[in-house]
Image (cartoon, helix red, strand yellow):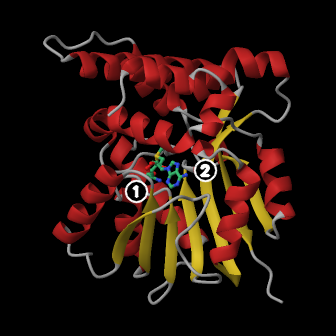
Amino acid sequence: MMDKDSYRRIVSDRENREDNYREGVKEYYSLATPGYLSGWGTSFHFPPFHPGQTLEEAITTQQHFIAREGNFAPGMKILDAGCGVGGPAIEIAKYSGSSITGVNLVTAQLDIARDTAQRQGLGDRCSFVEGDIMDLPFENDYFDAVFSLEAICHTPNKHDAYSEIARVLKPGGTFIGTDWFCADSLDSSDYARLIDPVCRTYMLPYITSIQELEGILKSVGFAVEESRNVEDLGSMEPVWNILEGFANSEMPPGLSDRDKFSFEMLSESFAVTATAARQNAFLVGYWKSTLPEG
Ligand SMILES: C[S@@+](CC[C@H](N)C(=O)[O-])C[C@H]1O[C@@H](n2cnc3c(N)ncnc32)[C@H](O)[C@@H]1O
């Protein structure tokens, strides 16, 4: 656990976030995980909503979509890069019959993931390993497929992160996922005004546009089949409404100093994300790519 001032120093600018990404991410999730668990459940990603869906239904629909689009099937060995507390890995393993290994920097999240998988009878097909997307603890060509939901945004060098994922994926394998992006056409002053606050408050060194994502994926050997704003798959309006609802809520009484800091941090981050999204500067993007054989 870090003191507030040390954490504020780490997140203060891009260079500090890049240089200290491991410590920063660990501290961010030490502060944020209880709030995410109570508001979002065991899956920490922003889903597009179909008409009439609850948050839980929208999350599950999104996970099943990833499993179907990735052609995940029984017997396949799949990596979840940046697995959080395991909600997506467990649901996708259940739905697809595949075996999933989640990797994560944060020990306390891995403990929750292992415990949840055991309780749901998925302990034999879901495993959770401490490790860094930037330096994955797996051999070359180890996985049949890789997915990642809103995690690579935390990495300090997207080229090196995707390249590391390409290394552990078998030729012919699919790499599919969602992440946080800025708009393709965003200029540097709008990036500074609208995206920097998102990066600072979620401990993201920086984020790219979807256009840049495509370029990076291709540069590390992937063939990009699809990349798009997830708004094409459903409405993100309910997500921004939930974030604004929290940001406008009163702090509960009786919190410890650390819980107050955590509440203020989440409130600010949710407010700046909703603002950036409503001004079309911020979006959640989806991609599907494959590693060509030979
Ligand atoms: C927004 S959460 C998403 C978690 C999960 N994919 C989900 O949808 O529930 C981002 C996750 O990425 C993990 N993460 C961030 N940077 C990482 C890195 N360099 N290596 C491994 N995991 C990382 C965080 O600890 C966190 O669990």
Question: Does ligand 1 reach within 8 Å of label 2's beta carbon?
Answer: yes
Tally the numbered discs: 2
Amino acid of disc 2: Ile
- Decide: few, some or many residues near mark 2? Use Cα within 10 Å; few <14, some 14-19, many ≥20: many
Mark 1: which secondary structure? Answer: helix
Quadrant of the image occupied by residue 195: top right
Instruction: Indicate left or right for 70 with 25 as reference.
Output: right
Question: Label 1, on which residue?
Answer: 60
Residue 110 in the image: state x and y as whole percent: 32, 58
Relative to the observer, which residue lies in front, 196 or 53?
196
- Residue at the (39%, 39%) spot, across then down: 29
As drawn, 256 above or below 185: above
Question: Label 2, on which residue?
Answer: 152
Relative to the observer, which residue lies in front, 44 or 263?
263
- Residue at the (77%, 50%) spot, across then down: 213
Relative to the observer, which residue lies in front, 129 or 23?
23
Amino acid of disc 1: Thr
- Residue at the (27%, 75%) spot, across then down: 122
Name the outermost residue toward the left. Answer: 254
As drawn, 266 above or below 209: above
